[in-house]
Image (spheres, rainbow, N blue to C red):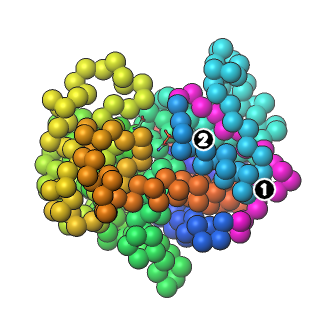
Amino acid sequence: MPRHFLRDDDLSPAEQKEVLALALRLAEDRFAERPLEGPRTVAILFDKSSTRTRVSFATGVAELGGSPLVMEAGSSQLGRGESIADTTKVLTRMASAIVWRTFGQDRIEEMAEHASVPVVNALTDQFHPCQILADLQTIAQHTGGLTPGDRPALAGRSLAYLGDGANNMAHSYLLGGATAGMDVRIAAPVGHRPEPSIVHAAEAIAERTGGSVLITDDPATAVRGATAVITDTWVSMGQEGESGRGEETFHRFQVTEELMELSGGIFLHCLPAYRGKEVAAAVIDGARSVVWDEAENRLHAQKALLTWLLRHPDEATAAHARPLDRR
Ligand code: CP
Ligand code: NVA
């Protein structure tokens, strides 16, 4: 059984630290790891648009010594109705890992069931775990980097996410932030709160790591003293036609200069950003913004993840298997 990375809690707290420590090292020494030398191929599939994920995975696989195979779903037989199982059985005979951006989490879970190589979630409707690894790396870099034990210093720090609390980013901050031992605060309109099962999962993780979880509809409560203030688009891919996703619902949750003052921390955004909507231009283009470091860290974090997954086959899966009822 290979290790997969389908959601943020597929890495235990100790494992997440190992991946982040490697990501921080790769940011300093870019060609230090070559696990894909051969070159071995990594299949990178997209059912949705992408700029950063596409470029960072393609570049990262090449820098690890491998060969990236980037495919649009529409140009593969998957897009014409070939089953996920059949597609996966073919890919897994040739590729050393599969990276997929798709819609429902059930689709990537199904792929993982049929794959004998690691499957990596490059964004689903429910989670965006690779982005959170890059974001945690960015917070560590800007707030202390490595501790003496060569571990990223994140435990006890806080992240405040404002906006659509029910989207993939909010869910991944809950799980990934709690895994890192952080205080995760989500400020969202009442009708756009995170999935309760994800909140409960994050609370259970936080109990073990010393982190905490707060869900509120008050942006000021969330950002006060926060190490990092974060937001994301109010309209995720696939939600374009939905009503009630505009300023009338979300205007109180725009990240403004006033809210950043209240925080005193750094600003992150996974991008693409919509200035004047979820974030004021003066914030994302201002001195507290670390969004370009964050975008670059997609490269380092994903290289670290792929390196780690390829080095940790089955015995580790048994040690940290997610309960089947959460799949
Ligand atoms: N942040 C992110 O995943 O960007 P892309 O959609 O451009 O890949
Ligand atoms: N929540 C956004 C993230 C984009 C990287 C979306 O799913 O469109």
Side of 73 where 182 appears, left or right: left
Residue that carries the numbered disc 2 in the rendered image: 54
Marker disc for residue 262: none
Instruction: Label 1: state its secondary structure.
Output: loop
Q: Residue furthest bottom?
A: 148
The percent position of residue 260, horizontal first and vertical second, equals: 21, 59
Near-viewer residue (21 or 210): 21
Q: Is residue 76 above or below residue 169?
A: above
Residue that carries the numbered disc 1 in the rendered image: 65
The percent position of residue 209, horizontal first and vertical second, equals: 38, 67
* Residue at the image position 19 percent from the left and 43 percent from the top: 253
Within the magenta stretch, is there residue 71?
A: no
Side of 208 where 3 appears, left or right: right
Residue 227 figure quarter: bottom left
Task: Please tell me in which quarter of the rendered image ligand 2 is found.
Answer: top left
Near-viewer residue (135 or 15): 135
Near-viewer residue (314 or 151): 151
Label 2 near ligand 1 (CB < 8 Å): yes
Q: Amino acid at mark 1?
A: Gly
Instruction: Label 2: state its secondary structure.
Output: helix
The percent position of residue 229, horizontal first and vertical second, equals: 28, 57
* Residue at the image position 42 percent from the left and 29 percent from the top: 237
Q: CA distance from mark 2 to mark 1?
A: 17 Å
* Range shown magenta: 31-48
